[in-house]
Amino acid sequence: MLQITIPKQDGWDEAKEEFVYFPETTLILEHSLISISKWESKWHVPFLGKGEKTAEQIKDYVKCMTVNSNVKDDIYDQLTKKNMDDIMEYIEDPMSATTITDRNGKKFSREIVTSELIYYWMVSLQIPFECQKWHINRLIKLVQICNIKNQPDKKMSKRSTMQQNAALNAARRSKSHSRG
């Protein structure tokens, strides 16, 4: 969860030709599966995709991340550069001490990840739905760990299997004092 404060500001509303006052506002934000799901349902594109997002899409995502209620839309126009830098730093934070590297030189899937796919992963891995409120990077790290831990044991090569069988046979012959 990230808490940011938008400083109080005065401005001019050109449409109404009047001065406007924006009080200091504190926003509580969550970069979670719920936020991504809200955003994707509006924009119909994957949030976690590699494509660039417009300023309007980014501002709308901040709205989707907002936990506190009754925040007027024009408040989001008052976000400062520092506010946006803090938000981007929070979004990019891994939120985990776990690091996962490639196994055997294999690359991770390049599958397009959407909120529905992440919900599917949660269901198939029996991850409780309370985790949809976690920081998304932490949730994805949990999914990765579950996938790694649930992988079947690696098969032995033919040579290793033959060596193991030969050792077992030798041990049995030795135990039963037999030659074959």
Image (tube, rainbow, N blue to C red):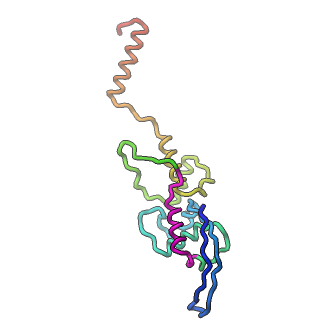
Residue 2 visible in rendering: yes
**Residue drawn at (40%, 33%), measured in percent from left and top?**
155
The quarter of the picture where the N terminus appears is bottom right
Counting from the top left corner in percent of width and height, residue 169 is at 38, 16
Q: Is residue 19 placed above or below 62 in the rendered structure?
A: below
Q: Is residue 123 magenta?
A: no
Q: Nearer the viewer, residue 13 or 56?
A: 13
Q: Is residue 32 left or right of residue 45?
A: right
Counting from the top left corner in percent of width and height, residue 39 is at 54, 67
Q: Main secondary structure of the magenta part?
A: helix
Q: Can you tell which quarter of the image residue 80 is in? A: bottom right
Extreme residue toward the top, this view = 177
Magenta residues? 76-96
**Residue drawn at (56%, 62%), measured in percent from left and top?**
31
Counting from the top left corner in percent of width and height, residue 36 is at 54, 63
Extreme residue toward the bottom, this view = 17
Counting from the top left corner in percent of width and height, residue 24 is at 64, 76
The quarter of the picture where the C terminus appears is top left
**Residue drawn at (58%, 71%), measured in percent from left and top?**
63
Residue 40 visible in rendering: no
**Residue drawn at (42%, 47%), measured in percent from left and top?**
101
